[in-house]
Image: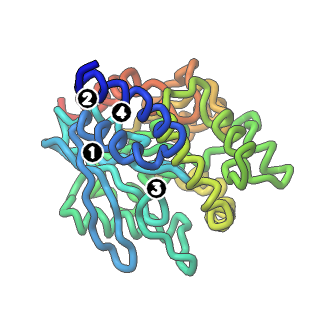
Amino acid sequence: MNYFTLILAALACLVPATWYGRPELLRPALTELNRKRAGLEEQTIALGRHQIHYLAGGQGETVVLLHGIFGEKDHWVDFARRLTSHYRVIVPDLPGYGASTRHEDAAYDYASQTQRLAALLDALGVKRAHLAGSSMGGTLAALLALEQPQRVSSVAFIGAPHGIRSLLPSDMDLAIEAGRAPLVTPDAQAFREMMSLVFARPPFLPYPILQGARSQALERAPSNQRLWQEQLRDRHLLHERIAALRGPVLALWGGQDRVFDATGARMLGALLPQAEVEVLSWLGHLPMMEAPAEVARRYLRFLTQQSS
């Protein structure tokens, strides 16, 4: 047996053992590889008391992608891969989430986060951008457009935004009414139930990535409970304000969304007649992760319409 064969044999034994036994050793490399394939690189910037981590890449008009509650920037990478050849793409970990700073004495409600989002765009030199968001991120995009319309070229809800009343209660609505917080996961079983709630077609996640997400969710559960309560206080804020939104709006709502029932898309269309609303019947709450290529194609078509 030659030296090269010995090395291959050793790797064949070592990689599976590391993959499942020490996944934290492989997670950074897997994450970085996926970012590079999308033309994105991680950067940091100081924003008051917060250190903000964000991904950036591409050239052209600026598109900012905003994650949902307890989400993070890498949830957008497969979706963003289709955008970076056409646009400058910025994907932040919003203050309090992902790798960005969270302070236990700071508020992360919509009013505070909308101010921080505007400050982040200022710090990055972004005078005007297309904003797209998932769930909480979609609501932040709309709120900034309402407060500072001159700096928002368009708003896109990639998946249901938080805060629109639906005609039928969702599974998450029923859980909230029963006094539960289904997106806060204090143990492994709660994490599995949360994953089932947010995905209709779960994407493939390498074990080291999935394990990292689970570990962080369990570790942050007590702190996440506080942020969850802040959001509950603004549970239907968007419904109350969205009729005043002007400018181009796209909504891609998962037809199998168990977090915000798809009947909310009909309500959104009634409140915002100029919006382009489409229900994607086969998808759940996170379309940009479940079908990144197909959903990005629809978003690119919308963006192209704004330039024509």
Examine the rendered structure and indicate whether residue 107 appears above or below residue 93. Answer: below
What SS does tag 1 mark? strand
Marks 4 and 2: which is nearer the front?
A: 4
C-alpha span from label 4 to label 2: 19 Å
Lower sequence index among marks 1 and 2: 1
- Expressed as whole percent of the image width and height from the top left, the position of residue 144 reads 40, 59
C-alpha span from label 1 to label 3: 14 Å
- Expressed as whole percent of the image width and height from the top left, the position of residue 228 reads 65, 60
Q: Is residue 112 left or right of residue 257?
A: left
C-alpha span from label 3 to label 2: 23 Å
Instruction: Please tell me which residue lies in front, 4 or 247.
Output: 4
- Expressed as whole percent of the image width and height from the top left, the position of residue 114 reads 43, 64
Which of the 4 image quadrants contains residue 168? top right
The residue at the far front in this view is 1
Lower sequence index among marks 4 and 2: 4
Q: Residue at x 53, y 42 (%)?
A: 21
Label 1 sits on what residue type?
Val
Lower sequence index among marks 4 and 3: 4
- Reading the image, the residue beneath label 4 is 79
Which quadrant would the C terminus be assigned to in this image? top left
